[in-house]
Image (spheres, rainbow, N blue to C red):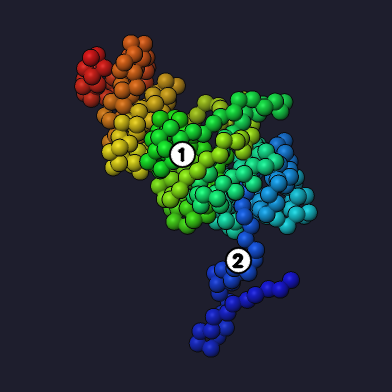
Amino acid sequence: MLMLWKFVIINSDVRFNNLSMIKTLQKCESVPKVSVIIPVYNVEKYIKRCIESVLSQTLQDFEIIIVNDYTPDKSMDVIEDYIKNDSRIVSVNNYSNMGLMWTRREGYKIAKGEYFYFLDSDDFIPRDALEKVYNKAVEEDADIVFGNFQYVDNDGTKGKIHKHIFPYGAQKEGIYKAMLSFQLLHCVWSKLYSRRLFDNYKYDTFPHQTNAEDCILTYQLIKNVNKISRIDDAVYYYFDDPTSSSKKRFTNDVVRQYAFSLAYVYNLLKTELVFRAALNRFMAFHISALCYNNYDIEIIKSNIGENTTEVIMGLSSLCKYNRIGKAILYWILWRSNLFRVLIYKLRPVINYIRH
């Protein structure tokens, strides 16, 4: 195998320049059309199905990047068999459990593809998924292509198809508004991304194991898009596992991370007046959901910071036209101890929703 080496001559010494070597090799290597990035943790039962779904794609010009998030099971034993037989599959290892956001980061740091496709290791994709989203991206010079996804249960039965629609248009302002109003999901999977979006992505500003990783990544990437497209086909099978850890009750630490993610979205968009009403409703919905489940309001309040009054007003706007909604609001506030914590702030809110 021909290897190209690049040297730097300094003071008559020949010194090996790692960065230059990597860049030189990357230029000489063929660039795959799509890098499929798969984080792996505790998926021994599902990883074979996931990888096989990629290997059987109608578009074969891809690479698979497996990122081992310090998985304690035998997932990597299964994966090693694939790596031995297919040079398009590579793996990297985390030396501790870092969580999805940082694990995906390790994947796209080494990805060589024109586009990135994120695939969770307990999910899988239709046979023509990569071809459809790639062709759409090339045809329309799109930075992101949204595709639909379909739920799959434990016995493999395919269920409801979730459609991504653009009710406010395909410009990024319309996409933000649709996500803030829950008409578009902020998940990173079922979408194809141009690698250009990741060139200036500042992931190092976020703590390890941040919950709601998709929320942070998606909102920041969309801020830098030039063109967004969609296809009206299911390009992702989402495994709806009722035993998943994501469906279990959050710990206070996870709530803290979740609140951080909400605060990040708020700070990213708060200067855009066009998003103010939708943003407040978005924040209010998530905070009220946390309060409803009896999470520690002080943890939420300390991470949200100075946005409390606006969030409460957003919560009231969710249900100001609905008597039942008003009753639910009062009940949530009472159950979450917000009356005791924020009593001096609540008077204008109560007056607002009474009218």
Give the labeled residue for mark 2: 26
Q: Estimate the x, y position of residue 80 in percent, counting from the top left.
A: 74, 50
Mark nearest the camera among 2 and 1 is 2
Q: Which image quadrant for residue 352?
A: top left
Give the labeled residue for mark 1: 215
Q: Is residue 243 above or below residue 275?
A: above
Q: Is residue 122 above or below residue 317?
A: below
Q: Estimate the x, y position of residue 278 in percent, counting from the top left.
A: 34, 31
Q: Which image quadrant for residue 16?
A: bottom right
Question: What residue lies at 60% left-to-right and 66% top-to-bottom?
Answer: 26
Q: Estimate the x, y position of residue 135 in percent, counting from the top left.
A: 60, 48
Badge 2 or badge 1: first in the primary sequence = 2
Badge 2 amino acid: Gln
Q: Is residue 151 visible?
A: yes
In the image, 75 versus 184, the foreground residue is 184
Q: Residue furthest front?
A: 139
Secondary structure of the residue carrying numbered label 1 = helix
The quadrant of the rendering that contains the C terminus is top left
Q: Is residue 304 above or below residue 109?
A: above
Number of marks in the image? 2
Q: Alpha carbon of mark 2 to alpha carbon of mark 1: how far?
A: 31 Å
In the image, 132 versus 283, the foreground residue is 132
The answer to whether residue 207 is left or right of residue 316 is: right
**Disc 1 crowd, CA 10 A, few/some/many (<14, 14-19, 20+):** some
Question: What residue lies at 68% left-to-right and 54% top-to-bottom?
Answer: 61
Question: What residue lies at 72% left-to-right and 39% top-to-bottom?
Answer: 49
Q: Is residue 287 visible?
A: no
In the image, 147 versus 107, the foreground residue is 147
Q: Estimate the x, y position of residue 171 in percent, counting from the top left.
A: 41, 43
Question: What residue lies at 72% left-to-right and 26% top-to-bottom?
Answer: 155
Badge 1 amino acid: Cys
The quadrant of the rendering that contains the N terminus is bottom right
